[in-house]
Amino acid sequence: MAFTPHGKHLIAGEWIATDARFSSSPAHGNAHEFSVGTVELVDQACEAAEAAFWDYGYSSRAARAKFLNAIADEIDARGAQITEIGSQESGLPEARLEGERGRTVGQLRLFAAHIEKGEYLDRRFDAAMPERQPAPRPAITMVQRPIGPVAVFGASNFPLAFSVAGGDTAAALAAGCPVVVKGHSAHPGTGEIVAEAIHAAVESCGMPRGVFSLIQGGNRAVGQAVVQHPLIKAVGFTGSLAGGRALFDLCAARPEPIPFFGELGSVNPMFMLPAAIDARGEELGKGWAASLTMGAGQFCTNPGIAVVIDGAGADSFVKCAAAALEGMPEQVMLTDGIAQAFCSGRDKFKAEQSLRQVHVAESSGRNAAPALFETTGAEFKANLALHEEVFGPLGLVVRVDSLEEMRALAAELDGQLTITLHMDDADVDAARSLMPVLERKAGRVLANGFPTGVEVVDSMVHGGPYPASTNFGATSVGTLSIRRFLRPVSYQNLPEALLPEDATE
């Protein structure tokens, strides 16, 4: 049965409509009407989240694990409907949505298993030493505790994995923090049905209703109200550099500044080392073209730049990448606005005198066709506009003269989510010389693969130095992401009866 949205907000277990409405803009299928968020609804949701925290923040890890698993079950139970409306709204293929749903529920189940183990609490204990001279030492216990209500902004490019029940929400709930979600207007129907799944899990698990709320739509005032509400203690965000930086500044300007965990943008450069290029230039060119255009290039890990030492191997690599792109059709973009922004960014590259157009196909309407440019290392270094992300299927080849110039170029880069080394055995020494620079620039360094695709596992880091993220010590993927919504508390000389349950297990 197809899902027909009712278009209401979910505020602490109640579906609430507002007078103002907006229409969805699906890639295909019917548009639907949705209520517009208000500052008043933000206040209601945050007040309910704070009230819920006094129960949920002190619930057992077993209870929260059961809740996370129940959310996963409820999402899976609505799988076909989620795929249908998600594909209509975003234009993403059904297979992609199925995979993203698997990632989303897998993440919830991973976090459930992780918190039950208890290692994330980083418990520490120093026994009392009453006989110590010149002064006795008290008994001190330390454990991580949840921080309170968390605000999450849904992402445009991942309607499931980085939105209503995505990584930020899952991590906050795992930590013991109620969540207020500001849904993305690009996929409000998908957000609503996922909210229904969470609501069902709240009811079946007997959780306080204020543990989750979804506010749809709304203008900048609504987003500002969310991050500046005094009861919100942290914010999770995935989106543009401009939007994220504006929210970050608002968080910092609060009377009580709070952490803003923003994943903002990255060009994810690849460094193509000589032996690999000479041996596999054709293969690497084809592989890059496939990764560059995956999902119309709408991945935050899209490898937008390839740095290669000039020569015959570079020529072969570029030629094969261009040939592969020539056979790629237009792809539908997530929104009309994203499609327009891509075309604007592509046209700026076309106008750059320092760039050579290798392959540029015309785009139409909400569709995007791939584009490939190349430049020199000197031109790239001199023109900071070339360092900026163009969200979509656009690639830039940077030709350098030597390994030394490659290393110097790497040192000039901004912070990145990922950096890739393509290398063969003969490139080990060259790669070793690059590594001290690369690991300072990125949250994830990989070899002989493409960064599109982020494994949801304990060891994953999805973050990096600014502007890849606003907190270089955090990740939005993997079990370490739970730590963003915890803070350490020491308990000195407290009797065991007063210690949190998590501190004494």
Image: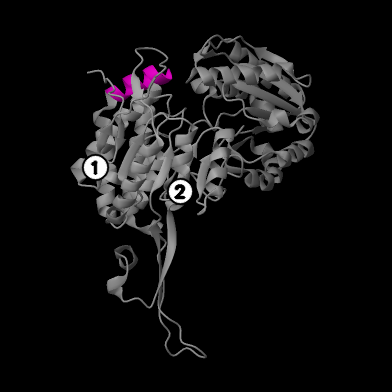
Q: Quadrant of the N terminus?
A: top left
Magenta segment, which residues? 81-93
Res 189 quadrant in image: top left
Q: Where is residue 26 shown, x and y percent of the image? A: 40, 16
Residue at 65% across / 43% down in the picture?
438
Residue at 61% across / 45% down in the picture?
465
Q: Is 87 a magenta residue?
A: yes
Q: Where is residue 457 shown, x and y percent of the image? A: 42, 43
Q: Where is residue 54 shown, x and y percent of the image? A: 30, 56
Residue at 47% across / 43% down in the picture?
227
Res 212 quadrant in image: top left
Which residue has dot 2 on it?
A: 234
In the image, what residue type sits under mark 1? Val
**Earlier sequence position, callout 1 versus callout 2:** 1
Residue at 34% across / 66% down in the picture?
503
Distance (Cα) linking label 1 and label 2: 22 Å
